[in-house]
Amino acid sequence: MSANIPQTGQKRIVIVGGGFAGLQLAQRLKRSNYQIVLLDKNNYHQFPPLIYQIATAGLNPSAISFPLRKLFAGRKNLYFRLGELRAIFPEQKYIQTSIGKLSYDYLVLACGATTNFFHNADIADKAMPMKTVAEAMGLRNALLSNFERALTCATEEERQELLNVVIVGGGPSGVEIAGAIAEMRRYVLPRDYPDLDASRMHIHLIEGSSKLLSAMSPQSSKQALEFLQRLNVEVALNTLVQDYRDRTVYLSDGRTIPSLTFIWVGGVCGVPLTGLPAASFGRGGRLIVNRYHEVKDCHDIYAIGDIALMEGDAAYPKGHPMMAQPAIQQGFNLSCNFLAIQQQQARTPFAYKDLGSMATIGRNLAVADIGRMHFGGFVAWFLWMAVHLRSILGVHNKLAVLLEWTWSYFTYDRSNRMIVRAKLPAVLQERRERENRTHWGDIKPPQDSASAEQNKPID
Ligand SMILES: Cc1cc2nc3c(=O)[nH]c(=O)nc-3n(C[C@H](O)[C@H](O)[C@H](O)COP(=O)(O)OP(=O)(O)OC[C@H]3O[C@@H](n4cnc5c(N)ncnc54)[C@H](O)[C@@H]3O)c2cc1C
């Protein structure tokens, strides 16, 4: 198998990852004189800030996903390939992918972050992460199936296990999913399951530090806690999850919570990469880059977005926040620099412009920090909706989300409550397994050089 990209004499930029960073770069270069190859393991761009709404039946996956091919239809210098990066061979300037070998003049790694389980095998094996649309669908199925089973299970103990929800991580994802599940308990459960006692459903949010939303202002942290308590979410601060086994969560304060819904949004680290020197990796398995996005100790390899840990920005000594805006702005800056290289002009060092951050907890309940200003409650909630609606790709998706939000605001309903279990036809399943085994071809994978830093937590 081969990636099948023609040699056109143009310099080839291979971008791995069509998330916020990679997509911004590819879109900005689509009219340039470079040959752009965008590789992604999915054929769509996803909008992670609304993933929790998929998990809680508020939105359909198609509303926050956009086909990558559609974005580049008709562009002759841009090639999209559905495939997964397997290894990088920096000396020979090519990458090995699930669809074959791909050579590059410049390689841009924009492959984002993945869930960090901090080496706890029990947790990694059994917890439900919520990083991708597919994982959010799995979570939605689990939540809804557990409600169904709670009606028919044999014992009270089992019913409690099915109704207890434990969420680990008090960052924006944890706060948002906790609020959304609390709203399901309040508005959906009594209507759909009148013979189930909704008050028996306990939602626990566990956070290791002393506050929620630690990257936001103290007012936002405090207000998020108040809002969650108002929704009857049981928040435990300064508490660590030590293990999850036998359907029980073990906490550092000695408590145990029996639960079949154990959601892990407790940390992220850079996606594992094979073939780069150990010195290129920093804290949390992110790639150390300079202000021109060049990866340390590599030649013609760049990293942008969540995977990049930029050194040299005095205001962000631990790198930029792993959020959409830094990713988009880095993609934009790198595109300008690639154009500058072609025009033999000076490149611009990256400077991050903080546009603020926000999190929503529930209906009319959100927090937002914009510059020195803090907003809470309805105003923040309205701002949150406007910003997210504006950022979703595609007019059709914007309208779909607006319609769903308006509908559920007035009806208190969440209309996507189907338990959908995907089943691949046998022939496709067989091919997928075969692909996973092969495509190293005649080459050996380089030694895995990800440094020991890979799984250290990110502050
Ligand atoms: C649940 C959730 C909620 C969030 N909420 C917010 C929010 O409200 N506001 C905010 O600013 N940020 C939020 N974020 C963070 C934000 O989504 C990320 O910071 C942003 O997506 C980073 O962009 P990126 O381009 O670096 O990576 P991503 O957007 O993650 O894109 C990475 C791309 O690389 C592809 N990829 C990965 N590995 C490979 C491989 N080996 N081969 C090929 N392709 C690969 C993936 O398929 C993906 O398309 C949230 C994140 C999550 C998970």
Image (tube, grey):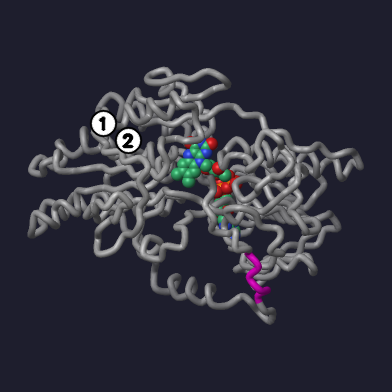
Asked if residue 82 shows in the view, the reply is: no
| Secondary structure of residue under mark 1 | loop
Q: Residue at x 35, y 25 (%)?
A: 365
Q: Position of residue 237 (x, y in %)?
A: 35, 40
Q: Magenta residues?
A: 445-450
Callout 1 touching callout 2 (CB < 8 Å): yes
**Residue highlighted by disc 1:** 231
Q: Which residue is mark 2?
A: 179
The majority secondary structure of the magenta stretch comes to: loop
107 displayed left or right of 426? right
Q: Nearer the viewer, residue 3 or 121?
A: 121
Q: Residue furthest right?
A: 344
- Looking at the image, residue 355 sits to the left or right of residue 190; the answer is right
> Is 33 located above or below residue 431 in the figure?
above
Which mark identifies residue 419?
none
Amino acid type for the residue under numbered disc 2: Gly
Q: Amino acid at mark 1?
A: Leu
CA gap between label 1 and label 2 equals: 7 Å
